[in-house]
Image: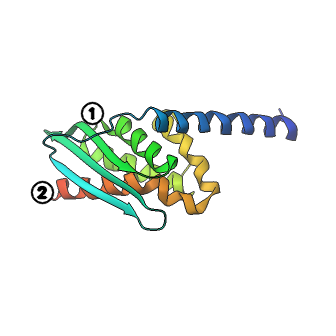
Amino acid sequence: MTVDKEEFARQEAELDELYREIIIDHYRSPRNRGKLPSPTVSREGFNPLCGDEITLDLSVADGVIVDVRYDGQGCSISQSSASMLTDAVKGKELEEARSLFRRFQAMMVGSGVADPEELGDLEALSGVRKFPVRVKCATLAWHTLDEALESLLQGKS
């Protein structure tokens, strides 16, 4: 079965539009935005190239992220990515969250293929790869998460 070039282009355009809608939805209606009153760990991330800022608070019990919040300012990509991150890691064990970070990072740098079942809405950010300067925007919250996870796994909240 062959798909002609026009059909492929149409399908790709529809997928890009769906991804844009997901990103815009998370930007306009952020999930888990705010600060936790007593986080187990809190980390700040900053992208000096564009001014994006993220503060990520995690509440962890028995090695599980029971709550997560983010606060910050920046472009729609950085803020949407932070919102998606909070949805994706809540309820995960620390090592599961770290594994998700690695898969997300691989997708963003083009060394991994996004598995829709595994990444869910996060796959919408894969289109950012077309704009290399924006990859840092999409990964800011994720690198901040990785720093928080590293401190927890090493016992240094």
The image shows residue 110 at horizontal and vertical percentages of 57, 57
User: Disc 2 marks which amino acid?
Assistant: Gly
Q: Quadrant of the N terminus?
A: top right
In this rendering, would 50 be left or right of 38? Answer: right
Residue at disc 2, secondary structure: loop
Separation of residues labelled 1 and 2 (CA atoms) = 20 Å
The residue sitting at 16% across, 59% down in the picture is: 154
Tell me the residue at 53%/39% (across/down). 23
Which quadrant of the rendered structure holds the C terminus?
bottom left
Where does label 2 land, which residue?
155
Q: Which mark is residue 73?
A: none
Q: How is the image coloured?
A: rainbow
Q: Are marks 1 and 2 in contact (CB under 8 Å)?
A: no
Q: Residues within 10 Å of mark 1 (few under 14, many from 20)?
A: some
> Relative to 3, is 57 on the left or the right?
left
Mark 1 residue type: Gly
Image position, residue 71 (x, y; %): 32, 46
Q: Residue at the location (52% across, 54% down)?
A: 108
Q: Report the residue marked by disc 1.
A: 91
Residue 9 visible within the image: yes
Q: N-terminal of the two: label 1 or label 2? A: 1
Looking at the image, residue 35 sits to the left or right of residue 30; the answer is left
Look at 51% across and 46% down and name the residue there.
76
Crowding at mark 2 (Cα within 10 Å: few <14, some 14-19, many 20+)? few
Task: Give 85 or 50, whichever is nearer the viewer.
Answer: 50
Does residue 2 appear in the picture of this structure? no
- Secondary structure of residue under mark 1: loop
Q: Position of residue 4 (x, y in %)?
A: 87, 37
